Amino acid sequence: MSSSAFLLLDLEPINTIGINVLEPLLKTQGLNVATGTNILDVPEGTRLLFIETSSQDAWGKLKEQLVNLRVKCDIVLFNLDENPELANRALLSGIRGVFYTTDNADVLMKGIRLLLEDQLWYRRDIMCNALNRMLQFNKDALHKLTDGDIEPVKLTKREKAIISLMSNGSKNKEIAEALSISPHTVKTHLYSAFRKTKCRNRIELLSWAQQNIPDEIR
């Protein structure tokens, strides 16, 4: 199995944890470590790709980077601030783990070792949130089987467009500008989507969309 890691660094990092802490810790585990600032620099054979995710539009930037990734490897985010929504999105997208700016060397080492054992590395609250959503989806599926045919959820084109933009990390104001509508209208469509899908917040709505209409929110 490949024993190399790549640190994809921000051009203007908020600290030097990648070079000063993460890189040495990875080397203690026998990994060959390379660094760079361009996703195209990630070499073939990389096992773990650590992406620094500290910018304001972290999710939007991350999606742009992953579109250009040409190497099959496990992805880990590091240098995150306390952003549960971003961590939830990462978990639902198949990213293997998340490290925060507040994590010390002991936490980083524990996470690295588990990742090398092909386990996930997320905080318990993030894992519980994702598991609860999965259980709710299974419960809904069971309800459909035992309660007979239920009319499928039908979102309008506008509601789907808003969810698609939201999945890219866009805020209500940015969605309104992109669709040439008012922020109030955006909220109205979102409330309608919440009601139809029985989702309680944006994270659940994004999760529902990824499960039910993945091709329509890309």
Image: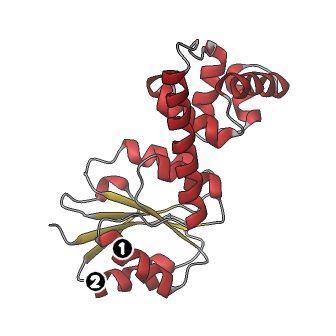
Does residue 40 appear anywhere in the picture? yes
Asked if 134 appears above or below 150 in the picture, the reply is below
**Rendered-image quadrant of the N terminus:** bottom left
**Left or right of 5 on screen, residue 172:** right
Question: x, y (%) of residue 16?
Answer: 52, 79
User: Which element is circle 1 on?
Assistant: helix
Asked if 53 appears above or below 30 in the picture, the reply is above
Give the residue displayed 49% in from the left and 86% down from the top: 105
**Left or right of 11 on screen, residue 33:** left
Asked if 162 appears above or below 19 in the picture, the reply is above
**Structural crowding at the residue carrying mark 2, measured as other residues with C-alpha within 10 Å and reported as few (<14), some (14–19) or many (≥20):** few
**Structural crowding at the residue carrying mark 1, measured as other residues with C-alpha within 10 Å and reported as few (<14), some (14–19) or many (≥20):** few
- Lower position in the chain sequence, tag 2 or tag 1: 2
Q: Which residue is mark 1?
A: 114
**Real-space Cα separation, disc 2 to disc 1, in angstroms:** 11 Å
Asked if 181 appears above or below 208 in the picture, the reply is above
**Of marks 2 and 1, the one in the foreground:** 1
Q: Which residue is mark 2?
A: 29
| Location of residue 208 (image quadrant) | top right
Give the residue displayed 53% in from the left and 15% down from the top: 148
> Which amino acid is tagged 1?
Leu
Question: x, y (%) of residue 204?
Answer: 62, 39
The chosen color scheme is: secondary structure
Give the residue displayed 59% in from the left and 53% down from the top: 129
User: Which element is circle 2 on?
Assistant: loop
| Location of residue 123 (image quadrant) | bottom right
Front residue of 11 and 9? 9
Question: x, y (%) of residue 199?
Answer: 67, 34
Question: x, y (%) of residue 113?
Answer: 34, 78
| Location of residue 7 (image quadrant) | bottom left
